[in-house]
Amino acid sequence: MIRYATSGVVFLALFLAERAFIASLPAPFAAAPLVLAAGVYAVQHLSLPDGVAWILLGGIASDALALTPFPYATASSVAASACAVSLSRSVFTNRSIYGILACGSAAIVAKALAGASVLAVLGLGGPGSGWFSPIAELPLALALGVLSLALLFRFAKRIRRMLSSIVMVTP
């Protein structure tokens, strides 16, 4: 029970940091996918299923708080989490930095493609705007996501030590 509560607190901290702090940064840095990067890192490197829940809850919370058009964030987070889980279990089974970066990059691409598809189906994308914006922001999201994952990998031992002290992983 305490593990789930701790995971919820970690998710809440990540979500608030992404939506409140990172979103208020200047233009290039505001697109950093912190919850997605942390979720992919947890699934790929730490083998924690909590990472999938973080990604899914990030999308659901964004839709519930009306930060995005209704099914946009939920559908794109479902695609990203499905991509992260399937790739981490079948393709990138090692815990190297290359596996983490590749899995994270694929999840970011899946999130952008699913988001663009949802916006196109909803008809929110008129000519020149709307459905194409997730695709247009993809290079920046990839760069910031890879940077976030590389930083998480760099501090892997400290993160593992911290998570083991709060009962999320075994030492």
Image (spheres, helix red, strand yellow):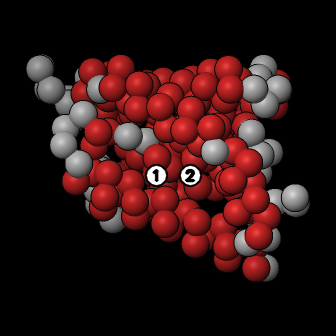
Placement of the C terminus among the 4 image quadrants: bottom right
Residue for point 46% across, 47% down: 34
**Residue at the spot of label 2:** 56
Q: Horizontal and vertical percent for residue 142?
A: 43, 25
* Residues marked 2 and 1 touching at CB (< 8 Å): yes
Residue for point 49% across, 38% down: 148
Residue for point 76% across, 79% down: 2
Q: Nearer the viewer, residue 57 or 41?
A: 41
Q: Horizontal and vertical percent for residue 17?
A: 40, 60
Vertical comparison of 20 with 102: above or below = below
**Residue at the spot of label 1:** 59
- Residue 137 figure quarter: top left
Q: Amino acid at mark 2?
A: Leu
Q: Horizontal and vertical percent for residue 53?
A: 64, 55
Which element carries disc 1, helix, strand or loop? Answer: helix
Which residue reaches farthest right? 170
**Image check: 160 left or right of 27?**
right
Which element carries disc 2, helix, strand or loop? Answer: helix
Q: Please say whether residue 30 is visible from this viewpoint.
A: yes
Q: Amino acid at mark 1?
A: Gly
Q: Horizontal and vertical percent for residue 22?
A: 32, 51
- Disc 2 crowd, CA 10 A, few/some/many (<14, 14-19, 20+): many
Vertical comparison of 158 with 90: above or below = below
**Image check: 109 left or right of 116?**
right
